Image (spheres, rainbow, N blue to C red):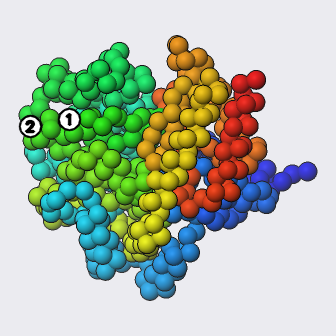
């Protein structure tokens, strides 16, 4: 008997190109909190969160109420034609929340990629330099420039070149697979110091506008640098007048137990990009940075027709209210401790788990065929994701070799839902390693 899901899959194959990827075959009818219900009535515990978009949960009542209220007033005027209060209010709040004891300004766009594009535009304009340094395993989007900044070739870049010029890539602080063959802490964070050598071998400091990095690499495998890394990187950038851009598209809005993940390193970047969970499910991104940088581009040099849509801004204001008034950052911190404890226990039990890393509830498990060679267990990871889906748990993988499981569950997940999800996950691990 055909199910509604099967019928919709046929329509999808007929009318939509194969390019858009799907982690599961599910079509969703409704979703609340950390649970999705598919069109056939099946309940799915959500550990993916729309790829880090649903930190405050699916359809949070306060976010939905803000969206409905704004939709009844006006939906679009274009900020460049007739301004509106939610844009200004949200900018002021983000300026106050962003790290750094200095004056800040914020502009809005629609997606994480657009935020990164605009951050780079600001950095190039303000410095008068063309060069941008990014990192191996980094992900910054799918537009021409951000696809260039993104490290992984397949599926993101393959066949889509030529790419944007003046982009240079250096190794990141991947301690589990150190690109320099060293071991932390004896390495003295040589990966950060390498930036000085990079200026000699690849691009001169005098022609470098910005260094852009994710504080925890998202698609790249939740690679999490040691405490010394970003302070060192910032010091070198300051030495040469280079803008430090921190891409918080996935890590921001409370994902790591802090509003901004870079707060874990006690660093105040020159520019921060935000998106995903900021809009509570609506398309919205932000570029927040030092006023003297953000205010450099000429009038009309930044913006876009839909950028900072009033409904999305109202949703984001509600998201911030929920994060702080409902103490979700504290809950995220506690959730992270629970997850780390549970995953470390699984690591001791299952040899396939080579590394457990992350901050707060933004945690990754890197799966390997054996812990000596650290050969990526790519096929096993795919099987685990598929097995968990069949049992009612939505997971997504990441990493250069697709062998990393990442947790992006909504921060409002209940203890019962979390326990059920983790039980399904461990059952899948047990079956995988028999």
| 2 or 1: tag closer to the N-terminus | 1
On the image, which quarter does residue 347 sit in? Answer: top right
Residue 224 image position (x, y, % from top left): 39, 36
Q: Residue at x 63, y 30 (%)?
A: 381
Q: Residue at x 11, y 32 (%)?
A: 205
Name above or below for residue 412 compared with residue 338.
below
Name above or below for residue 317 compared with residue 345.
below
Residue 71 image position (x, y, % from top left): 48, 81
Indicate which label's residue lies in the foreground, 2 or 1. 1
- Residue 239's label in the rendered image is 2
Name above or below for residue 73 compared with residue 188.
below
Query: Horizontal placement of 353 versus 357: left or right?
Result: right
Between 417 and 177, the residue placed more toward the observer is: 417
- Element carrying mark 2: helix
Name above or below for residue 207 compared with residue 177.
below
Q: Residue at x 55, y 70 (%)?
A: 60
Between 112 and 386, the residue placed more toward the observer is: 386
Residue 172 image position (x, y, % from top left): 33, 29
On the image, which quarter does residue 278 sit in? Answer: bottom left
Query: Horizontal placement of 24 versus 138: left or right?
Result: right
Query: Horizontal placement of 201 versus 422: left or right?
Result: left
Residue 249 visible in rendering: no
Residue 64 image position (x, y, % from top left): 54, 75
- Residue 232's label in the rendered image is 1
Q: Residue at x 25, y 66 (%)?
A: 96
Residue 427 visible in rendering: yes
């Amino acid at each position: 008997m055909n199910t509604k899901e099967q019928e919709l899959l046929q329509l999808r194959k007929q009318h939509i190109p194969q390019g858009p990827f799907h982690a599961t075959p599910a079509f969703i009818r409704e979703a609340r909190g950390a649970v999705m219900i598919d069109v056939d009535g099946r309940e799915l515990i959500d550990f993916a969160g729309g790829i880090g978009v649903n930190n405050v949960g699916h359809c949070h009542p306060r976010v939905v109420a803000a969206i409905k209220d704004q939709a009844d007033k006006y939906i679009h005027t274009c900020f460049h034609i007739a301004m509106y209060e939610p844009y200004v209010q949200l900018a002021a709040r983000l300026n106050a929340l962003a790290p750094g004891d200095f004056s800040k300004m914020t502009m809005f766009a629609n997606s994480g990629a657009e935020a990164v594009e605009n951050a780079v535009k600001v950095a190039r304009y303000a410095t008068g330099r063309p060069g941008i340094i990014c990192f191996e395993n980094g992900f910054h989007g799918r537009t021409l420039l951000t696809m260039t900044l993104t490290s992984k070739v397949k599926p993101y870049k393959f066949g889509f070149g030529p790419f944007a010029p003046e982009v240079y890539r250096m190794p990141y602080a991947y301690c589990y697979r150190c690109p320099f063959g060293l071991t932390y802490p004896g390495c003295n964070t040589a990966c950060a110091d390498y930036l000085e050598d990079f200026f000699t071998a690849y691009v001169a400091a005098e022609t470098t506008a910005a260094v852009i990095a994710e504080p925890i690499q998202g698609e790249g495998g939740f690679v999490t640098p040691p405490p010394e890394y970003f302070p060192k990187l910032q010091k070198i950038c300051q030495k040469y007048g280079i803008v430090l851009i921190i891409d918080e598209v996935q890590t921001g809005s409370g994902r790591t137990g802090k509003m901004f993940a870079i707060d874990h390193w006690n660093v105040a970047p020159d520019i921060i990009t935000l998106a995903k969970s900021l809009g509570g499910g609506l398309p919205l991104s932000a570029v927040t940075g030092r006023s003297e940088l953000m205010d450099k581009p000429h009038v009309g040099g930044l913006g876009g027709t839909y950028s900072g849509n009033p409904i999305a801004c109202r949703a984001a204001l509600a998201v911030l209210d929920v994060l702080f008034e409902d103490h979700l950052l504290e809950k995220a911190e506690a959730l992270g401790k629970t997850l780390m404890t549970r995953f470390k226990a699984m690591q001791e039990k299952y040899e396939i788990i080579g590394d457990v890393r992350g901050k707060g509830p933004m945690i990754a498990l890197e799966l390997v065929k054996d812990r000596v060679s650290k050969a990526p267990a790519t096929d096993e990871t795919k099987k685990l994701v598929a097995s968990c889906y069949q049992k009612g748990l939505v997971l997504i993988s990441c990493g250069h070799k697709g062998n990393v499981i990442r947790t992006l569950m909504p921060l409002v997940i209940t203890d019962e839902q979390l326990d059920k999800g983790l039980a399904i996950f461990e059952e899948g691990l047990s079956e995988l390693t028999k």
